[in-house]
Image: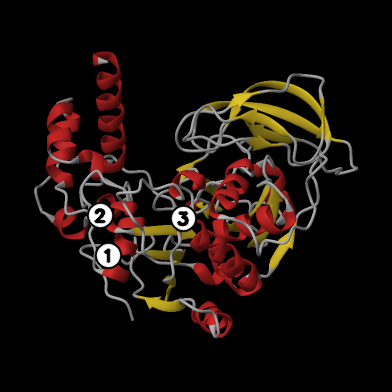
Amino acid sequence: MAGGFFGGVHPEYNKELSRGKSIRVMPLPEQLTVYFSQNLGAPSNAVVKKGEEVKKGQVIAQPGGFVSTPVHSPTSGKIKSTGFYPSPVGTLMEAAVIIPDGRDEWEEGCDRERDTAGLTSDEIKDIVKEAGIVGMGGATFPTHVKLSPPEDKPIDILILNGAECEPYLTSDHRLMLEKTEEILEGASLFARAINVKNIVVAIEKNKPGAIEKMREAVEGRDGFSVEPMEVIYPQGAEKQLIYSITGRKVPAGGLPMEAGALVQNVGTCLAAFEAARLSRPLIQRVVAVTGSGIKNPGNVLARVGTSFRDIIDFCGGMTDDTAKVISGGPMMGVSQYSLDSAVNKGTSGIVLLKADEVAQFENEPCIRCGRCLVVCPMKLNPSALSIFAERMRYEETGEHGVADCIECGSCAYVCPSKRPLVQHFKRAKAEIRNRSKKAG
């Protein structure tokens, strides 16, 4: 078993609710709300307007820079409206509301099988870029950028991230069981794109079925291996995963490529396979819909743009005492104020919790107990950072490394004073960014 990393916590995982449920394909809903920007980095720019007819796979938003991706229509139909709508990140986002025409008709050039054997590195990168593929573990960083390291930062290992360490979430687990060969084919394309011969599939030990299935599938594949990982949160965070597998540290403020590594989520590998082999852009994904507040927990293949309301209804609806709906897992996810929020490329799960599982806290002053220092996987001092942030001493949060915080929530999980530590750090980062922009 691969080694671990400093810090981390052991929350209740509660994956038994949906890990045994096969992926179900959700029928097209009556309307889709597709956000024009669905990646970390530069926002994409809309290229459609109200009343326009669109085809499935047609580009509806173009990338706004190199660190950006196009967005495609998830079906054929008509643009009912454009505007700002509730989103999973808790803010209003610009989007197009599409009314499907029921024909689900592909844009010309899409959905055609391609022989991938002769694709060059540049051709693979172009396909990934044009398909709008982003990191599907939730980060949504454009994948083509990860595949384009500068010449002075060579990569010698590709790590497939199948850790899925967030409590409740099981979509990656099901993909590894049901789309094993497709994931490995996608990984082979990534490896060819960056000329890497060493490919490791990293899976937490609480998914023994996925470990066994992957081990069988990599037999006979040169360079592939499977590493069972210690079950600890946040094992699936990039920097922690790289350290666990290789013992290499990504420098403060640096990217995985600076440790000679590339990490890709298993869902991202599947998307690359579908783009390269089937000429299909990223317009759908598997979402774990789970928690005690949903009547029929499961794993659902849904079109991008499907509302949370529709996908919850598809899973039987909420129980009467559901009190909280989270986009993502309970450690890093965002509580929803509207079920009109829609699935985007980074929506790995929707977790519904009952009233007796939800508590509202009044945060107290820091008592300097030091528990947060013991669990922070980035070896930061969350206690000091939060006090600086509370007092709006944002420059000092920067000096103490707030930019390196991965917002995993481990510190808040153990804090006896129930302090909103992650919220403090997000605010400090935003203030530092704004001041940097103003300073030019």
Q: Are marks 2 and 1 in contact (CB under 8 Å)?
A: yes
- What SS does tag 2 mark? loop
The crowding category of the residue bearing disc 1, from other C-alpha atoms within 10 Å (few below 14, some 14 to 19, many at least 20), is some
Q: Is residue 169 visible?
A: no
- The tag earlier along the polypeptide, 1 or 3, is 1
- The tag earlier along the polypeptide, 2 or 3, is 2
Q: Callout 3, which amino acid? A: Asp
- What SS does tag 3 mark? helix
- The tag earlier along the polypeptide, 2 or 1, is 1
For the residues marked 2 and 3, what is the alpha-carbon distance in whole angstroms? 40 Å
Provide residue 237's location: percent of width, then percent of height: 36, 57
Q: Callout 2, which amino acid? A: Val
The residue that disc 1 covers is 243
Residue at image coords 10%, 47%:
367
Residue at image coords 51%, 28%:
43
Instruction: Place residue 38 in its image quadrant.
Output: top right
Disc number for residue 356? 3
- What SS does tag 1 mark? helix
Instruction: Place residue 246 in its image quadrant.
Output: bottom left
Provide residue 402's location: percent of width, then percent of height: 21, 39
Q: Across the whole image, how many numbered discs are drawn on residues?
A: 3
The residue that disc 2 covers is 250
Provide residue 206's location: percent of width, then percent of height: 44, 76
Q: Callout 1, which amino acid? A: Tyr
